[in-house]
Image (cartoon, helix red, strand yellow):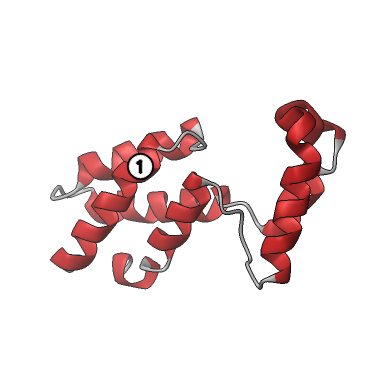
Amino acid sequence: MIDKKVLDFVVGKTNELIDAATCSSETKAAAQSWLAAIGTETEAEETKKYVAELEEDIMPIDTLIAFAESDAGAQVFGTDAPGVAAHAKEIKAAGGAYCDCPACAVVGEILEKKDLLLK
């Protein structure tokens, strides 16, 4: 059973994640499934699935840099691609390991509680 304080924190962050414009449809679905499973017999199983999805979807900073500098990144970010790449390089230079978009930032906060969620 997840500690109530941790659960409340993660539920709040999960709702922020669902509302984040940069949240992928897969992550949003996993978040909604996890929320629906709280307090049920499938909670532990859904928690494992949710954490796995979060770990899969958080964007490592080197991946963001490479993507922003690629042709595919130019298609997604348009004329902002060089700025996205430069920003990502600043994050990396400051010691950051992940993208800081709204979704990735929240995922990072949730994953900090991973060990407490999975116990």
The quarter of the picture where the N terminus appears is bottom left
**Label 1 is placed on what type of residue?**
Ala
Q: How many numbered marks have been drawn onto this rendered protein structure?
A: 1
Callout 1 environment at 10 Å: few (<14), some (14 to 19), or many (20+)?
A: many
Percent x, y of residue 81: 77, 38
- Left or right: where 86 falls relative to 96: right
Q: Is mark 1 on a helix, strand or loop?
A: helix
Q: Which residue corresponds to the image point at 19% horizontal and 48% vertical from the top-left?
A: 38
- Left or right: where 61 falls relative to 6: right
Q: For residue 63, say whether it is visible.
A: no
Percent x, y of residue 49: 40, 50
Does 75 appear above or below 70? above
Q: For residue 81, say whether it is visible.
A: yes
The quarter of the picture where the C terminus appears is bottom left
- Left or right: where 25 falls relative to 11: right
Q: Which residue corresponds to the image point at 39% horizontal and 34% vertical from the top-left?
A: 29
Q: Name the residue under label 1.
A: 31
Percent x, y of residue 12: 25, 51
Q: Which residue corresponds to the image point at 67% horizontal and 62% vertical from the top-left?
A: 91
Task: Name which quarter of the figure residue 6 lies in.
Answer: bottom left
Q: Which residue corresponds to the image point at 30% horizontal and 65% vertical from the top-left?
A: 117
Seen from the viewer's position, the closer of residues 117 and 9 is 9
Percent x, y of residue 102: 48, 46
